[in-house]
Image (spheres, rainbow, N blue to C red):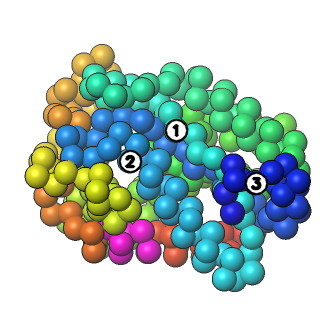
Amino acid sequence: MRMERLTWEEFEMAKAKASAILLPVGSVEAHGKHLPLGTDVFAPLEIARRVEKKLKDKGIEILIAPPIWYGHSFVLNVYPGTINVRADSLRRYVRDVMSEFAEEGFKKIILLNGHGGNVYPLIEASEEVAESYDVGIILINWWMDFRKEILEICSSQGHAGEDETSVMLAIAPELVKMEKAKGEKRSTPVRVIRRDVGLELFPDGVNDNPQGATREKGEKILEVVSDKIAKILEGML
């Protein structure tokens, strides 16, 4: 059930039945010339929808909160359309949102993250909330936590690469421009931090070869990831 579609009275009733609230967090940033800027939100939203359905089939109700669209995207900020939020701003914002959920009486909060730059701010925000409230926070980074399963479907994994492109082909194929899908895997032996490093590590906003992506692979990824998450949550909620 999507929170933003409810009146406050409906929310009050839904809250009483829900075992947890799930908060998708992503980013608005460049994903090559072939994927939309909202990829990191579209993916967790779709996974959340599938997880909710699977849990409901088991008799477990969760509420899906409106997503947090903007994330920490320092490296990709060299490309137009990337809206970078400072790590500390994101930490404080997510902390405040989760604190409000705790004030509403939720004992379990699920953070479903779709963007790598958010990981550390989300951990810090969760620790702050857990120190102040009697609440359990479950942080899921869908592409990281289920990397093994994803690499059994795709030959590689990376930003705007085969896995993300496949997922977007399954979610919204009309937004994917496969004729512009190209890239390669790049890395450095140590972390390099400078303003324009994204041009080197993410040429055209890509760090992987997306050309092997298919809708079928995306459907398999979405299904295996949502199934794994639902089974994990079933034992925790």
**Pointer 2: what residue?**
39
Residue type at the position of mark 1: Trp
Q: Nearer the viewer, mark 2 or mark 3?
A: 3
Residue at 28% x, 56% y is 174
Residue 223 relative to residue 107: left or right: left
Q: Position of residue 181 (x, y in %)?
A: 15, 50
**Pointer 1: what residue?**
69
**Pointer 3: what residue?**
6
Q: Secondary structure at mark 3?
A: loop
Residue type at the position of mark 3: Leu
Residue type at the position of mark 2: Thr
Magenta region's main secondary structure? helix
- First in sequence, mark 1 or 2: give its number: 2
Q: Secondary structure at mark 2?
A: helix
Let me know if residue 95 is in the magenta part.
Answer: no
Q: Are marks 1 and 3 in contact (CB under 8 Å)?
A: no
Q: Position of residue 8 (x, y in %)?
A: 84, 49
Q: Position of residue 71 (x, y in %)?
A: 49, 33
Residue at 57% x, 34% y is 121
- First in sequence, mark 2 or 3: give its number: 3
Visible residue check, residue 114: yes
Let me know if residue 219 is in the magenta part.
Answer: yes
Residues in magenta, as a range: 218-223
